[in-house]
Amino acid sequence: MAEPPLGTSRSRDKRYRLADPYLRFWTRFLEPAFPLLERGRSDVVLRRVREGWTAWQGRAVEPVVRESLARLLPDEDHGLVDRLPPTCHMRCSRSLAVGPYPRRSLLWYDAYVMTTHDDGALRAILPEDATQLPAAFVTAFNSGNAEHLDYLYSDLGVLVPGPGHPVTGKERAAADRHLLGFGLPLRAQLRHAYVSGDLALLIVDWSIHGTASNGEEVRLQGTATDVAQRGPDGLWRYAINNPFGAG
C-alpha cells in the first residue's frame, strides 16, 4: 500500500507499508521469533510482543480511527473543521481532540493496553541511569511485586542465585519469588559503576537480614557483580544479576 508521508506540507514522496495488520503482526513479531519458539522460549517472544505492542498498534488502529472520524465530521463541536488534519500525533490517553484551525492535529488514544505496564509505567520501574538500577531493584523487591521484579531483567537476563548456577526465564522468576517469600527487606548500596555505551558493570553491597515469615532466621549478604544493559527504549535492565560475585 502506497501513501504520502504525514506532514504539514504536501509531498510527492511515497511510503510503502503492509496494509494487512495480521500480516504486519506476523512479519514484526512471529516470523523473527521462530528460533526462540523452537527453543521453547515463548516467554521471551511474549515479552517482545508486549514491548513492541504500542508501536505496532499505532499503525494498525490509526486507519480505523481516521475512517471513523471522517464519517463523523463536520459536527457542531468543531465548527469549520470538516476533514481530518494532515498531522497525527499519538499519545496514551482515553480522549480525542481536534486542535484549532488551521493548525489541526488528531490525538487518538487506546483505552486498552496489552500489558499492565505502558511506557509510563515501565519508566516508573526502570531507570534511565545505570547507577540507579540497584535502587530500582530494591524498590521492586521490597514492594513484594514479583512482576515488577521480572521487568528489571532483559529478555535473556540471567540470575545467579548460587555460584556456578545461572538461571533464566521461569527458573529465574522462581528464584526471585523464593527470596520474596522470606518477607524481609533488601538493602543495597552501589559501590562502583563502570558504564561503556549500552553496558554497565555494577558492584553492589547487599543484605537480607531478619526473621522470615516462616520463623526462619535469615542472614544473607554479599557483594554483587552485575552486568546491566540499556535497551532500545533507553531504560536499563539486568543482563546478569550475580549477587554473590566471584564468591
Image (tube, grey):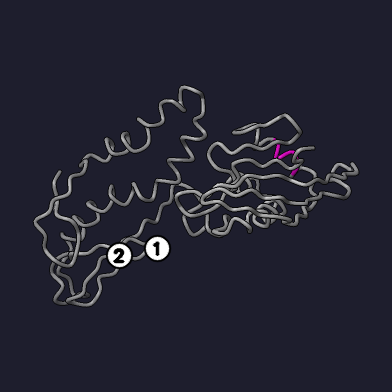
User: Looking at the image, is 89 positioned above or below residue 25?
Assistant: below
Quadrant location of the N terminus in the rendered image: top left
The residue depicted at 28 percent of the width and 39 percent of the height is 24
- Whether residue 54 is in magenta: the answer is no
Nearer-N-terminus badge (1/2): 1
Q: Name the residue under label 2.
A: 107
Q: Which residue lies furthest to the top in this view?
A: 38
Q: Where residue 147 sits in the image (x, y, percent)?
A: 61, 46
Who is closer to the viewer here, 187 or 239?
239
| Amino acid type, residue under disc 2 in the picture | Leu
- Residue 94 horizontal/vertical position (percent): 38, 62
| Left or right of 162 in this view: 45 | left
Q: From the viewer's side, name the closer residue of 105 and 74.
A: 105
Q: Give residue 179's mark.
A: none
**Looking at the image, residue 9 lies above or below residue 111:** below
Residue at 26% across, 65% down: 106
| SS type, badge 2 | strand
Crowd band around label 2 with a 10 angstrom C-alpha radius: few (<14), some (14–19), many (20+): some
28 lies left or right of 157: left
Quarter residue 179 falls in: top right
Amino acid type indicated by mark 1: Ser
Image coordinates of residue 8 in percent, x first then y, are 18, 67
Q: What element carries label 1?
A: loop
- Residue segment shown in magenta: 175-179
The residue located at (21%, 72%) in the rendering is 104
Q: Position of residue 183 (x, y in %)?
A: 79, 48
Q: Are circles 1 and 2 on residues that touch, CB within 8 Å? A: yes
Task: Please give the residue where the numbered disc 1 appears in the rendered image.
Answer: 93
Tell me if residue 54 comes above or below residue 88 in the rendering.
above
Distance from disc 1 to disc 2, alpha carbons, whole Å, reads 9 Å
Count up the numbered dots: 2
